[in-house]
Amino acid sequence: MRVACVLANGFEDSEFRQPYDALRQAGHEVTIVGLQAGQQLNGDKGRETAVVERSFADATPAEFDALLIPGGFSPDRLRAHDAPVAFVRAFFDEGKPIMAVCHGPQIFITADRYRERRLTAWKTIQGDLRRLGANVVDEEVVVDRNLVTSRQPADLPAFIREGLRLLEKAPARA
């Protein structure tokens, strides 16, 4: 499957690297999509770097089968721009697999795609989503239809396991 990993500076290092590597090891093609192609991005902890392979201006959701949203400061930085928000919204609207960890669901708020969903997130984001009416639970991993969410780096093994299961069940799009 073709997976878009949406990323900006300040991503949580392990929440990018571990799912990214696991997806690639499982045979999926992962493309880093960001604000500017060629931009080097740095993880919040300074352990990981990544390079934006495609910009939101040059990539469309139709080119991808699934979406990965690592946490850290990245989702908040992305949701300040219309193009990433529209990109994420399209995955919801098309029912494509979405995997978001920690602060990842922040962008769901701006995209207005959290209602009628059962999900989890980092504890402060849980509160934001709950106040807006989302069905938030405090569990290591939550699967709701095409959406897999987790709370924090400690949840990554469950997040990766359930994300890979979701991709196994989902049809690849041509």
Image (cartoon, rainbow, N blue to C red):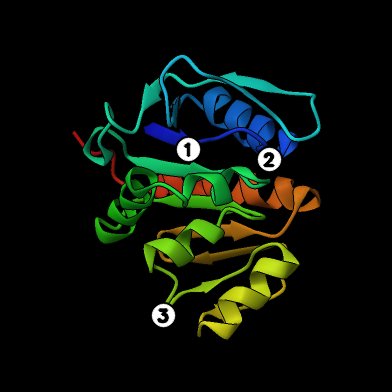
Closer-to-camera residue (132/98): 132
Q: Report the amino acid beneath label 1.
A: Val
Label 3 sits on a secondary structure element that is loop
Crowding near pointer 1: few (<14 within 10 Å), some, many (20+)?
many
Residue situated in front as seen by the camera: 80 or 11: 80
Q: Nearer the viewer, residue 13 or 117?
A: 13
* Location of the C terminus (image quadrant): top left
Q: Residue at x 65, y 38 (%)?
A: 11
Q: Measured from the top left, where is residue 7 in percent x and y? A: 53, 35
Marker disc for residue 69: none
Q: Which residue is under mark 1?
A: 6
Q: Identify the element where label 2 is drawn.
A: helix
Q: Which of pointers 1 and 3 lies earlier in the amino acid sequence?
A: 1
Q: Which residue is mark 2?
A: 15
**Distance from label 3 to label 2 (Cα)?**
25 Å
Q: Is 71 positioned to the left or the right of 39 in the image?
A: right
